Image (spheres, rainbow, N blue to C red):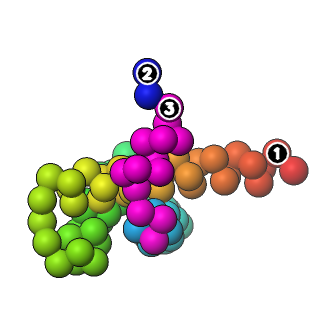
Amino acid sequence: MADITKILSEYSAPMIMGICVCIGYIIKKAVPSDSINRFIPLIVGCLGVGLNAWINLSFSPSIVLVGLVSGLASTGMHEALGQMLNKK
């Protein structure tokens, strides 16, 4: 099994992760219903692909991969930060 930190360092873009975690947080807080929570990974995954294509002005499988990994990693980052803040 591959080391997750190696995958994240090779196939993610910190700027895209930051934007996606902020947009995901806004969506989660703007919609009071919990029904939106299951769509947030889909939304930030697509957003990550779109942002990466826009930043690089191209579209290829590697653009899709980095965008998806960055967008989906933002959901994990949100959860990790939330758990760290709630422990204090």
Q: What distance separates the C-alpha of mark 2 from that of mark 1?
A: 29 Å
Q: Nearer the viewer, residue 6 or 82?
A: 6
68 part of magenta stretch: no
Is residue 64 rendered to the left or right of residue 7? left
What secondary structure is found at the residue carrying circle 2?
A: loop
4 part of magenta stretch: yes
What kind of residue is marked 3? Answer: Asp
Pick whichever of labels 3 and 1 is earlier in the sequence.
3
Q: Give the range drawn in magenta.
A: 3-15
Q: What distance separates the C-alpha of mark 3 from that of mark 1?
A: 26 Å
Residue 32 locus on image (x, y percent) = 49, 63
Residue on which disc 1 sits: 87
Q: What distance separates the C-alpha of mark 2 from that of mark 3?
A: 7 Å
When the figure is inspected, residue 3 is found, relative to residue 29, above or below; the finding is: above
Q: Which of 19 and 13 is in front in this view?
A: 13
Residue on which disc 3 sits: 3
Query: Looking at the magenta stretch, what is its main secondary structure?
Result: helix
Q: Nearer the viewer, mark 3 or mark 1?
A: 3
Q: Which mark is residue 75?
A: none
* Numbered-mark total: 3
Residue 48 can be seen in this image: yes
Mark 3: few/some/many CA within 10 Å (<14, 14-19, 20+): few
Residue on which disc 2 sits: 1
Is residue 46 rendered to the left or right of residue 13? left
Q: CB under 8 Å between callouts 2 and 1?
A: no
**Residue that extends furthest to the top in the rendered view of this protein:** 1
Q: CB under 8 Å between callouts 2 and 3?
A: yes
